[in-house]
Image (cartoon, grey):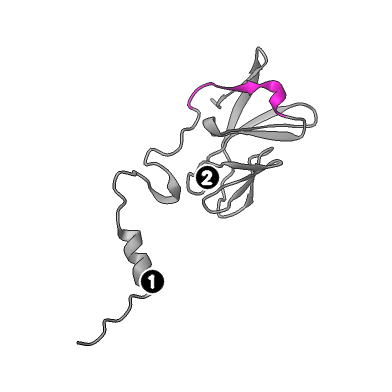
C-alpha cells in the first residue's frame, strides 16, 4: 500500500481555522459576539489625581483612557480599537497599543499613530465630580 502524503502546513491551518470552537462564543481578535463593553452612560473612573500632568491612565474595566495636558485639561476616549473592535489593554506613556493587530493611538488626541486602524478613537466627555473623574459619551 503506498504511503499517504503528509498534509501541507496550509491544509492543516485551513482545517484548524474552519473548525468551530464550541462554547467560546468568540469571533475574530478574541472578542465576544457582543463586543467589548463601551460606556453608554456616565462611568466613574477614579480620583482626579490618578492622571499625571502630560500623562494618561487606561481604565481597562471601562474601556476608557484619560489624559491630562500641561494646563490640567482632561480628555477621555473610548479605548476600543477602531480597526477590529478589540479592547486596548496596553498604554506606554501616552501611546495606546492594540493587542490584536498592533494599531497605535495617541491617548491625548485619539489620533491613529500606526495602522491598520485609520479612524481615531471616539472622544468622550470627562469631568470631575466631587474629586472623581466621570466619563460619558458625548451628546
Residue 91 higher or lower than 74, as above or below: below
Q: Secondary structure at mark 2?
A: loop
Q: What is the quadrant of residue 122 in the picture?
A: top right
In this figure, which residue is indicated by the disc labeled 2? 82
Q: Nearer the viewer, residue 52 or 104?
A: 52
In this figure, which residue is indicated by the disc labeled 1? 10
Q: Secondary structure at mark 1?
A: helix
Question: How dense is the environment of label 2, judged by Cα within 10 Å: few (below 14), some, or many (20 and up)?
Answer: many
Residue in view at x 44 percent, y 47 percent: 30
Residue 99 higher or lower than 42, as above or below: below
Q: Which mark is residue 107?
A: none
Question: How dense is the environment of label 1, judged by Cα within 10 Å: few (below 14), some, or many (20 and up)?
Answer: few
Residue in view at x 53 percent, y 31 percent: 61
Q: Is residue 44 magenta?
A: yes
Q: Position of residue 51 (x, y in %)?
A: 70, 28
In the picture as drawn, the residue positioned furthest to the right comes out as 70
In the picture as drawn, the residue positioned furthest to the front comes out as 1
Instruction: Give the extent of the magenta segment.
Output: 40-51
Looking at marks 2 and 1 on the same chain, the residue that comes earlier in the sequence is marked by: 1
The answer to whether the residues at label 2 and label 1 have Cβ atoms under 8 Å apart is no
Q: Nearer the viewer, residue 53 or 21?
A: 21
Q: Position of residue 138 (x, y in %)?
A: 56, 27
Amino acid at each position: 500500500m503506498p504511503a499517504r502524503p503528509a498534509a501541507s502546513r496550509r491544509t492543516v491551518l485551513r482545517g484548524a481555522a474552519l473548525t468551530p470552537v464550541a462554547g467560546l462564543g468568540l469571533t475574530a481578535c478574541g472578542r465576544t459576539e457582543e463586543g467589548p463593553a463601551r460606556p453608554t452612560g456616565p462611568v466613574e473612573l477614579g480620583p482626579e489625581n490618578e492622571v499625571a500632568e502630560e500623562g494618561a491612565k487606561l481604565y481597562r474595566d471601562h474601556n476608557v483612557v484619560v489624559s491630562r495636558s500641561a494646563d490640567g485639561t482632561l480628555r477621555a476616549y473610548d479605548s476600543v480599537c477602531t480597526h477590529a473592535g478589540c479592547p486596548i489593554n496596553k498604554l506606554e506613556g501616552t501611546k495606546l497599543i492594540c493587542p490584536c493587530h498592533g494599531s497605535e493611538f495617541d491617548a491625548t488626541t485619539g489620533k491613529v499613530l500606526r495602522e491598520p486602524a485609520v479612524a481615531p478613537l471616539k472622544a468622550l466627555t470627562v469631568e470631575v465630580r466631587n474629586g472623581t473623574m466621570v466619563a460619558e459619551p458625548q451628546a
